[in-house]
Image (cartoon, rainbow, N blue to C red):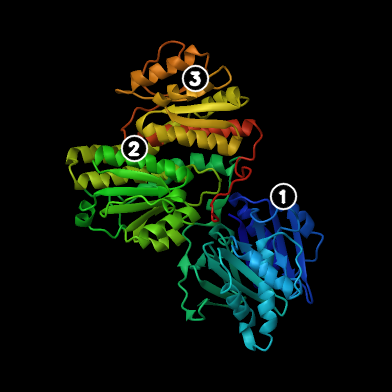
Amino acid sequence: MCGIVGYTGKQKAAPLILEGLKRLEYRGYDSAGVAVPAGDHFNVAKKTGRVANLETIAARHKLLGHCGIGHTRWATHGGVTDANAHPHVSSDGKIALIHNGVIENFTSVKKFLLEKGFTFQSETDTEALCNLVAYHYAKEAMVEGDSRLLESVRKTLRHIEGTYGIVVLSLDMPDELVCARKGSPLILGIGDGENLVASDVSALVSRTQNVVYLKDGELARLTPDSFSLSTINEGEIEAVIDTVTWSITDAEMGAYAHFMEKEIFEQPLALENTMRGRFSEDGSTALFGGLNLSAAEFRQIDRFMFCACGTAWHACLVTEHLIERFARVPVEVDYASEFRYRNAPLHPNTLFFFMSQSGETIDTLAALREAKRKGFRVLAVNNVVGSTIARETDGGIYQHVGPEIGVASTKAFTSQLLIGAMMALYIGRMRDMSFSDGAAYVAALKGAPDLVRTVLQQAPHIRKIAERFSTYTDMLFLGRLSLFPIALEGALKLKEISYLHAEGYPAAEMKHGPIALISERCPSVFFVTKGEMFPKVVSSMQEVKARKGLIIAICTEGLELPDGLADELIVIPDCHEAVLPIVATIPVQLLSYYIAVNRGCDVDKPRNLAKSVTVE
């Protein structure tokens, strides 16, 4: 959620840290800061608002050191003020620290430190952590060599309850960084004569492609020419260096106005990358190399449980529909944030899937650990190689869509829909789906990118519709069966980036309450498709029209609506049931995007939101 960047090397640290913080702006934050050792003190600049505000302040400071730390804060303890912004410096001036996460016992830690004579300038839990490091650092004054700061941090963390990703600086060792994580991601960037640390790979790839993903309970010590890993229990461990497979250009906006716009239009390529190499040679089924389950083991599964949050939860709902429809296996979908607090009876032959684009969503990770604790096999769908969820599961499926910078998920969502559809095929072919049905299904999935390209060509038409409806303050999204979750997703997108009130419902549920909202000032977006649902949805549309409600119809080609029923019409290709949710998603993404742009909203960095929710 918050952003961390640290640097030690031959270059001036501050410009590189500020560049890294800019690349982390999409994560969501309300203030930013940077600290660099300057002889007998830390030179600290911090400011509420955007990183651009921090740059203005930093320009007035002499941030000349070759080692430093920077942070973007999303407020948890204490309001949005300059004093509460990170980095924090201990009251004795010896230690500077940045922190992602929540220290649950900070009140008792702060009380202890006050009794020891430490003072506090902020309302944050992080300052208590910083002063506690300083307390142990003073006690470690007799420790010789390079281990004094590392040992001080290690002893501090043994007294801490909660989650953290921290980077610590000491005045006495101005080219050394000490890092640690528990529940909040940290990645080391291993360079040539320089080393870095960040909370997200995107802040590192402009300097190096070689990274080390810290695990919970691990500490790292960085100098310009070396790095080492150890644990809270002191044991030194060997690092595994991974290579980032995408470059900094993949995380740049290019000619687009926003990252969200870029990522909407990247979806055909993202879908192709998600599918690549994942179909059998005979073209009748999907293949997944990382599930670590044999076909025989898969056939023993009696029930699937999907857990996720937000947009990923909507993708799970579509997956539930497709697996039950094509594989005839019961599926349950639960909010990851609720799962571990319920005591639901679970069938012993249940397989768990956890969906998270970042692989760091704290609620999803906690649900995963709860399922493992109860003895279930757990698999994941995520987009970030080396993420915590990817490391802690028994197997999984990578999305391979590249970095998604916009807070509102677009290409990651349609990729999750595609993986869900492929999973339904994979399981169905193991059971009773015929070869010919499987081949038709595969052909439909392979055609999805081109269908999405067709819908994207309607962007100018959808922009005009958005101009008409951007002044409204309420909107309903209504769909049936697999398009009900897309209605939920459309409403969520509109809420996230335009701050309008929107709700998604099954179309038939409208008359069970939401119809009370219908008026000339509350438009409705209907998904209309052929088949047995067509007359049902048309009937719901007529109920809206009878109450003077305005209607935007997203309709598959070849259908004829009664004259005058739809005020605006968006036609999408008629396609296979497995592909329809993907194709139907594109118009609501574009509609939400253009409405938000018309309203002057900060599309890529909507207020109060973070790309990856890493605190509970």
184, 594: nearer the viewer = 184
| 368 relative to 48 in the view: left or right | left
Horizontal relation, residue 334 to residue 127: left or right = left
Q: Which residue is mark 1?
A: 49
Above or below — where is 217 with respect to 183?
Answer: below
Query: Residue at horizontal 31%, vertical 59%?
Result: 377
**Of callouts 1 and 3, the N-terminal one:** 1
- Please name whichever residue, 566 or 313, is drawn nearer the observer in this view of the structure: 313
Name the residue that disc number 3 marks: 551
Give whichever of discs 2 and 1 has the lower sequence position.
1
- Position of 513 relative to 72 (above/below): above
Which sits in the foreground, 84 or 228?
A: 84
At 45% across and 49% down in the image, what residue appears?
Answer: 338
Query: Could you tell which of marks 3 and 2 lies nearer the N-terminus?
Result: 2
Q: Mark 2 packing: few (<14 Cα in 10 Å), some, or many (20+)?
A: some
Q: Is 445 situated left or right of 152 in this image?
A: left
